[in-house]
Image (spheres, grey):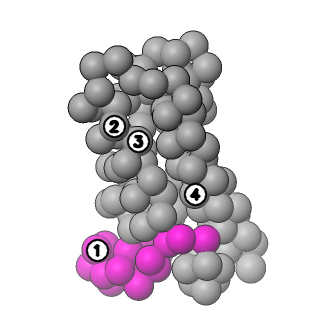
Amino acid sequence: MDSEILKSSGIDYDKGVARFLGDRQLYESILITFLNDDTFEKGKAALETENYKNLYEFIHTLKGVAGNTDMTTLYLTTAVLSEYLRKCEVPEKDKVFDLFCGMEEAYYAVMKGIAAAKEA
């Protein structure tokens, strides 16, 4: 895997490998497995139906995965959306949409980066 591609997509590769006790192969296999994860798609479906309770659960899960794999940009954007949904009893639809769009951009950058790094 090309670590520079991963770094340019918002993944702290070196920190991620260190988190996995230096096991590059294990860390990279986790990243590749993430390509098949459907949590984001479930979150997007919850957003479309304005089911903010489910959206929170999916985004919170995605935040955990991003944090544990050092997908830094994705982690930060999911953290903001997750915190907003957690604190707000009646979320503003436009605010949720804007935060989701920022998170979505980070998500697709990570997905594109992992796929490209895998092929390099």
Q: Secondary structure at mark 1?
A: helix
Q: Position of residue 79 (x, y in %)?
A: 35, 50
Q: Residue at x 50, y 42 (%)?
A: 99
Of tags 4 and 1, which is closer to the observer?
4
Left or right: residue 66 compared with residue 108: left
Left or right: residue 90 compared with residue 28: left
Q: Position of residue 22 (x, y in %)?
A: 33, 83
Left or right: residue 103 compared with residue 58: right
* Nearest to N terminus: mark 1 or mark 3: 1
Tag 2 near tag 3, CB within 8 Å: yes
Q: Which residues are magenta?
A: 9-28
* Nearest to N terminus: mark 2 or mark 4: 2
Residue denoted by label 4: 106
Q: Position of residue 2 (x, y in %)?
A: 63, 83
- Specify the quadrant that holds the C terminus: bottom right
Tag 4 near tag 1, CB within 8 Å: no
Residue denoted by label 3: 81
Of tags 4 and 3, which is closer to the observer?
3
| Depth order, front residue of 74/88 | 88
Q: CA distance from mark 2 to mark 1?
A: 28 Å
- Specify the quadrant that holds the N terminus: bottom right
Q: Secondary structure at mark 4?
A: helix
Q: Residue at x 73, y 70 (%)?
A: 116
Q: Secondary structure at mark 3?
A: helix
Residue denoted by label 2: 84
Residue 19's disc is: 1
| Depth order, front residue of 116/10 | 10
